[in-house]
Image (cartoon, helix red, strand yellow):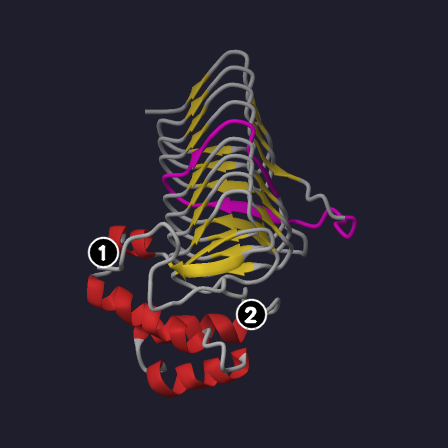
């Protein structure tokens, strides 16, 4: 089955459309855009050139994907937006192309981006992430897999967030948030491990306790962060979970977010015990 294109839509003959693509009223699809099988554009969607989108994606009304980056160093080099499969994109989302020849702004598979979100140039969003309404991601922000971001959170350029994190709404993220963490605030602080999120992702009680134990070491107030990382390497460097935290820390450029001042032997405020 070929593509369905509404009579009011404008689709370039140089765009590549997969099987069963649906393009709604008043959409615009430019040269060098690639839409995968079973992808649907609702009304008034603008897909610029050098945008590649996987299969089974749904783009809601008035979203703009692939426009030139808002960066004065951009000189019209060939850069891309690359989006995976099963992308759910709600209304008024904007995703900009990257800066730097051959570079891309990337969104992984199975992501849900809600209304009014902006992804700036060179942003990388991992797989299976959920981003709530009106969040802003500055250039070169990187988000790991299985991250949930609350509404109206703002990300400083070059910030990294590790996999399996939960970022609270209205947060101001100016430092890196390591994997498995629950973080909130302006500026951002780590409260605890993302206990509920990890449980939903299939991490059993033993593994969740083990991850919290590692963060007790890392954020021990009697140590510097450098000493905590060294202790973590010594005790847990051979484990999968420890390796993820250590690799993240080694690649951090903005420093790890501080923790809120509470006892990690107990749950974060408002949460039940880890079991």
The one of 105 and 265 positioned closer to us in this rendering: 265
What's the magenta region?
72-96
At horizontal 26% and vertical 50% (from top left) the residue drawn is: 200
Query: Which residue matches tag 2?
Result: 252
- The disc, 2 or 1, on the residue closer to the chain's N-terminal end is 1
- C-alpha span from label 2 to label 1: 27 Å
Q: Quadrant of residue 240?
A: bottom left
Looking at the rendered structure, the secondary structure element under dot 2 is loop
* Residue 123 higher or lower than 68, as above or below: below
At horizontal 68% and vertical 56% (from top left) the residue drawn is: 100
**Mark on residue 109?**
none
> Circle 1: is it few (<14), some (14-19), or many (20+) Cα within 10 Å?
few
Kindly report the secondary structure that dominates the magenta region of the rendered protein. Answer: loop
The one of 121 and 270 positioned closer to us in this rendering: 270
Q: Is residue 186 left or right of residue 211?
A: right
Query: Which residue matches tag 1?
Result: 202
Q: Position of residue 209 (x, y in %)?
A: 27, 68
> Circle 2: is it few (<14), some (14-19), or many (20+) Cα within 10 Å?
some
């Amino acid at each position: 089955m070929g593509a369905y294109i509404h009579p009011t839509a404008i689709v370039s003959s140089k765009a590549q459309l997969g099987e069963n693509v649906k393009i709604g009223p008043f959409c615009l699809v430019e040269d060098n855009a690639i839409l995968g099988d079973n992808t649907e554009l609702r009304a008034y969607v603008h897909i610029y050139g050098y945008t590649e989108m996987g299969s089974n994606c749904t783009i809601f009304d008035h979203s703009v994907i692939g426009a030139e980056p808002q960066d004065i160093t951009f000189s019209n080099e060939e850069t891309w937006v690359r989006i995976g499969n099963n992308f759910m994109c709600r209304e008024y989302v904007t995703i900009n192309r990257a800066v730097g020849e051959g570079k891309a702004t990337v969104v992984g598979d199975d992501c849900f981006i809600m209304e009014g979100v902006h992804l700036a140039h060179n942003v990388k969003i991992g797989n299976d992430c959920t981003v709530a309404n009106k969040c802003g991601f500055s250039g070169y922000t990187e988000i790991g897999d299985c991250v949930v971001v609350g509404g109206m959170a703002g990300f400083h350029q070059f910030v990294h967030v590790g996999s399996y994190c939960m970022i609270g709404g209205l947060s101001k993220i100016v430092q890196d948030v390591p994997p498995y963490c629950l973080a909130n605030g302006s500026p951002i602080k780590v409260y605890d491990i993302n206990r509920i999120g990890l449980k939903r992702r299939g991490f059993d009680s033993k593994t969740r306790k083990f991850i919290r134990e590692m963060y007790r070491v890392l954020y021990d107030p009697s140590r510097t962060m450098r000493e905590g990382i060294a202790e973590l390497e010594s005790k847990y460097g051979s484990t999968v979970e420890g390796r993820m935290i250590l690799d993240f820390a080694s690649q951090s450029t903005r420093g790890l977010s501080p923790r809120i001042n509470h006892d990690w032997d107990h749950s974060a405020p408002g949460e039940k015990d880890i079991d």
